[in-house]
């Protein structure tokens, strides 16, 4: 076994893993699994995160379209992984006799998609737990077992990684790939092996094939190559950087080929996503202003204040003591954070930072505790302090994941109290009402006359028995790309006198969602003027709204004041049109 002074906090070159299994690591991995798998079936069979629906639908559509997903808001690799996982699940179901054919399997999905969503979410759980193990490895490589253990504990409880592992999203798996990449670049730099540089480049290309923000993955590869070069001027004359670069490009091209082959569509979608993520942030916060909001999210939710401060202190200590190790460990998170300062502050984008936040904080804890009379006891106490806030938030969110969403509560009430076939106006991403077969067929024809129905619409129409009750669903929104949905812009409701815009569509009931009970809502005020409030799904634990509603795909600090996930949902009955009174 390689030698190392595990209590010194000094970077060393011992290999990981050692032959002896660390019981603390096993316990930490178990904790990480429980936090991420607890409440994994949240909402199902309904899905309240629109990104989950879009991502899984795109992956499943590959069976019909081929390998080109036709949309490049994200690269293609994750869709291929999800499609392979769905195929594997089908093979298991077929082998166990639970389905007799692929058609039966597809029909079952349209009746109840729960199993495939659990398969997709389980990939995020597995990646999240694996990221804890890789964080341990990075800490071990940096400064020994104590730092490794503390790092793993902090990563296991970090709030955003726990929350986002419950969803079919790119970010948790991307964070795992980045952490592995940084670990691989350390070995490449230490050995100078071209094979290891090729592996690092290939992993970087795979990361880019997974998510476009992985372009930042070139930074740790260049830093590792610089370690082998005599000078910056000589960097790009070395075989290491060119080997890694070639492997990067080849891996990306093989794993997400249609970004290059269908480049015009990719350019359109990337530009559209940039408007949402980057341009909106610059317009709202200025050139680097979003960074302040990112730090706020980190300190109040993702890592907690104590862990955030400890990570900053630990990073400074590493930078002052060990220049190369600081470059190896911190180059990627610093570059990625600079990227985040240009993006809209979504907590999920921070996932890639948390392995490095955990290691830096652990190093700070180890440095302080090593000078104390009882270093092990002090380190354990400080670790508990750093872990307390994110662990509390993670447990509170897991508690909400196991509870019925307000939208599910409202859906059940509507099914019992609103007549089958009624025309109901709903706000997008609120209550997922079943659309009647006749209304769906008419909507498809109105949206695209003569065009064949897509796979989703065909699957919905083929359901037998068809779900009941089902409604003529009208969405109060400005429209979208979904051919199977019919929209009525809220501006038309507000511009018309009274409720005539809704009366003209035959609407009898309106379902509204409120995400901020204290914010003015002109549409609600118009609806409430003459209508009758029939039902309210109230997410709070008391009659007074002392907090914001919590939606698991939205940022917001969990609190005991919220008893159910989801927004406030109100069901209103409109008065009869004047000519019917």
Image: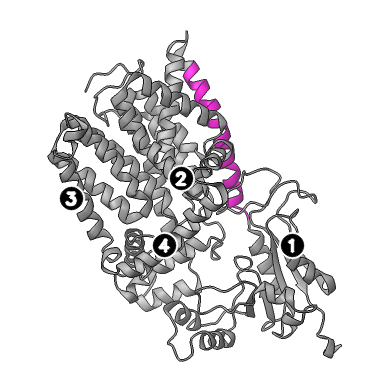
Q: Name the residue under label 2.
A: 340
Mark 2 burial class by Cα count in 10 Å: few <14, some 14-19, many 20+: many
Q: Name the residue under label 3.
A: 246
Q: Going by the image, does 313 lie left or right of 173?
A: right
Question: Residues under labels 4 and 1: Cα distance?
Answer: 32 Å
Mark 1 burial class by Cα count in 10 Å: few <14, some 14-19, many 20+: few
Q: Can residue 94 be seen in this view?
A: no
Q: Name the residue under label 1.
A: 521
Question: Which quarter of the picture shows residue 209?
Answer: bottom left
Give the vertical position of 212 relative to 272 (above or below): above
Question: Residues under labels 2 and 3: Cα distance?
Answer: 27 Å
Question: Residues under labels 3 and 4: Cα distance?
Answer: 26 Å
Mark 3 burial class by Cα count in 10 Å: few <14, some 14-19, many 20+: some
Q: Which color scheme did the rendering employ for the protein?
A: one colour
Q: Name the residue under label 4.
A: 271
State which region is magenta. Answer: 378-403
Give the vertical position of 350 relative to 518 (above or below): above
* Label 2 SS: helix
Mark 4 burial class by Cα count in 10 Å: few <14, some 14-19, many 20+: some
Q: Tell me the residue at 55%/28% (across/down).
A: 306
Q: Earlier in the sequence, mark 4 or mark 1?
A: 4
Image quarter of the N terminus: top left
In the rendering, at what x and y percent does residue 157 appear? 50, 37
């Amino acid at each position: 076994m390689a030698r190392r002074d595990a209590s010194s906090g000094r970077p060393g070159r011992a290999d990981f893993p050692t032959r002896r299994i660390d019981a603390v690591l096993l316990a930490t991995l178990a904790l990480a699994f429980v936090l991420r798998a607890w409440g994994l079936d949240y909402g199902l069979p309904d899905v309240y995160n629109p990104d989950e629906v879009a991502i899984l639908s795109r992956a499943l559509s590959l069976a019909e379209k081929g390998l080109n997903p036709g949309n490049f808001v994200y690269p293609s690799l994750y869709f291929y992984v999800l499609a392979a996982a769905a195929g594997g699940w089908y093979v298991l179901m077929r082998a166990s006799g639970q389905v007799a054919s692929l058609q039966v399997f597809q029909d079952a999905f349209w009746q109840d998609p729960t199993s495939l969503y659990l398969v997709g979410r389980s990939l995020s759980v597995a990646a999240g737990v694996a990221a804890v193990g890789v964080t341990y490895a990075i800490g071990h490589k940096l400064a020994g077992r104590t730092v490794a253990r503390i790092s793993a504990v902090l990563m296991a409880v970090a709030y955003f990684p726990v929350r986002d592992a419950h969803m079919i999203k790119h970010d948790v798996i991307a964070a795992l790939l980045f952490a592995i990449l940084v670990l691989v670049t350390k070995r490449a730099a230490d050995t100078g092996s071209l094979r290891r540089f090729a592996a690092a480049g290939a992993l970087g290309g795979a990361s880019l094939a997974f998510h476009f923000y992985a372009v930042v993955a070139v930074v740790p590869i260049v830093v590792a190559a610089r370690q082998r070069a005599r000078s910056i001027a000589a960097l790009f004359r070395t075989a290491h950087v060119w080997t890694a670069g070639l492997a990067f490009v080849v891996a990306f091209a093989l794993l997400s080929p249609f970004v290059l082959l269908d480049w015009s569509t990719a350019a359109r979608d990337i530009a559209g996503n940039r408007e949402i993520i980057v341009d909106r942030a610059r317009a709202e916060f200025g050139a680097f202003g979003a960074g302040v909001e990112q730090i706020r999210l980190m300190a109040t939710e993702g890592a907690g204040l104590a862990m955030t401060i400890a990570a900053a202190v630990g990073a400074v200590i590493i930078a002052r003591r060990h220049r190369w190790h600081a470059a190896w460990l911190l180059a990627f998170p610093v570059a990625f954070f600079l990227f985040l300062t240009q993006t809209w502050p979504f907590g999920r984008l921070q996932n890639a930072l948390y392995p490095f936040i955990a290691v830096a904080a652990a190093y700070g804890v180890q440095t302080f505790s090593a000078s104390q009379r009882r270093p092990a006891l002090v380190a354990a106490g400080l670790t508990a302090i750093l872990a307390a806030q994110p662990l509390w938030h993670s447990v509170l969110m897991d508690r909400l994941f196991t509870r019925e969403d307000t939208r599910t509560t409202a859906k059940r009430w509507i099914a019992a109290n609103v007549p089958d076939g009624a025309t109901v106006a709903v706000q997008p991403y609120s209550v997922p009402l079943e659309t009647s077969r006749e209304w769906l067929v008419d909507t498809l024809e109105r949206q695209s006359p003569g065009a064949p129905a897509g796979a989703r619409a065909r699957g919905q129409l083929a359901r037998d028995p068809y779900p009941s009750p089902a409604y003529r669903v009208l969405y109060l929104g400005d429209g979208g790309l979904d051919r199977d949905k019919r929209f009525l812009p809220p501006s038309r409701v507000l511009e018309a006198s009274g409720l005539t815009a809704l009366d003209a569509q035959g609407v009898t009931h309106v379902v509204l969602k409120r995400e901020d009970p204290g914010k003015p809502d002109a549409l609600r005020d118009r609806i409430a003027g003459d209508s009758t409030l029939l039902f309210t799904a109230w997410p709070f634990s008391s009659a007074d709204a002392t907090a914001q509603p919590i939606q698991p795909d939205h940022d917001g600090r969990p609190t005991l004041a919220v008893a159910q996930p989801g927004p406030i949902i109100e069901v209103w009955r409109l008065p009869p049109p004047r000519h019917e009174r």
